[in-house]
Image: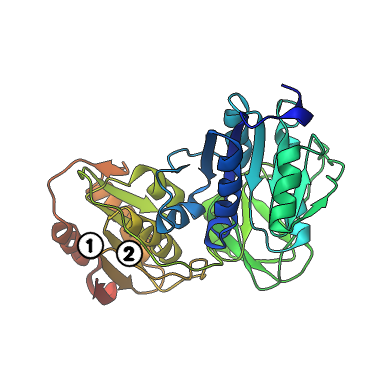
Amino acid sequence: MCHNELADVMKIGIVVHGPEAIDTGLLQKVLKIAKEKSASVKTIMSGYTGIAAVIDAGLEDIIDINQRVIPSEALLMLDKESDVLFLVNYGKNRESIIRFGEIIYSKIKDRLEKPLCQIDNGVIIEWNHADIPITIEIAERLGFERIEAPRISTFAKDEKWRTITGIVPGENIWINGIVIGKAISLEVAIAKNENGRLVARGIELKQSGVERLGNFDPFTARVRSGVIRRTKATPRSLATKERKGIYLVNHATEDAIYSCRNAKFVITVGDDTSKTAASVLYRFGVPIVAITDGDEDGICDEKIFYPGSIVLRLKSGSDDLIGNELKNLIFKNSNMIDDDISMEGIVDVIRKLAGDSIVMEEKY
């Protein structure tokens, strides 16, 4: 089938990134047009930050939220079974929109066979084929501007610094899901030193985050800024399924989202980890036991816990220590146990380990 003669029988693959594309209704508008043109529309949510938005909008039967894939991987998956691909996102500004698409397309441009169109906040970018009829129609119906795809820049292998665009001073910067500091400039760049550890320009680094990040590759790392969900929606929880296993999540929220959906309950360590994991696990009907110490960076604006959840606030710097002791004592250095121990039983263990380090407890 010729790309500029795509008929109504075309197969459409959609990758949606981030909650804002759903909360604003952009994805729903794209889906409506796509379904008018095709009987075969497959949609994948890429990244854990948008999963709550999918459930809140009641789209979990339409959008695949089970794939733990980055946007470029999701596009390649759909490329095999689609005639045209849409990347739906809702960026903060024009600069971040273009850079987001450029990063993704640069990873797959030599392997992608089908037309790729980025549908974003007010703009449409046709990355590898121009004037696709359905793209033109979407632009007209949504009132979006079609802009020319920029020439793709590539990083030289010996280049040290990666520039991060679309940053607003004061925003938290997180790399691979870990908050590593706060932007203090419009010009932000990251690199690694001789030990593979993060160094940065334009960022006030948080040393505990840098240590958790450890050895990393600045050019393949997933970098985000601001909060997890800039938009709001009414929370919704799915019907409870059979529950199995107790999980420990220590500063690795993404693990919780994909592996703990059917857990009896989840123990989370860290303020941001607990708040973020609780927000998404609420949608799956999973309560948590949160071990925190008040050191919150504020990447999650939503404070919502599934009924039965318990938050233990410890003295500053104590959450990691107790989390590690709990992992050694109960989880035997694993992240999951299939045990009959109750939530209250786990909380009692934490109370004994923490002793007078406990500042307060909250039950939901």
Q: Identify the amino acid type marked 1.
A: Ile
Q: Position of residue 28 (x, y in %)?
A: 54, 53
Q: Foreground: 145 or 190?
A: 145
Q: Which mark is residue 145?
A: none
Marks 1 and 2, Cα distance to the nearest angstrom?
Answer: 9 Å
Q: Which residue is mark 2?
A: 291
**Residue found 36% across the figure and 42% down from its top:** 259
Q: Is residue 189 visible?
A: no
Q: Is residue 126 visible?
A: yes
Left or right of 291 in this view: 129 = right
Whether tag 1 and tag 2 are in contact, CB under 8 A, the answer is yes
Q: Which residue is mark 1?
A: 350
**Residue found 56% across the figure and 47% down from its top:** 31
The color scheme shown is: rainbow
**Residue found 45% across the figure and 64% down from its top:** 272
Q: Position of residue 72 (x, y in %)?
A: 64, 37
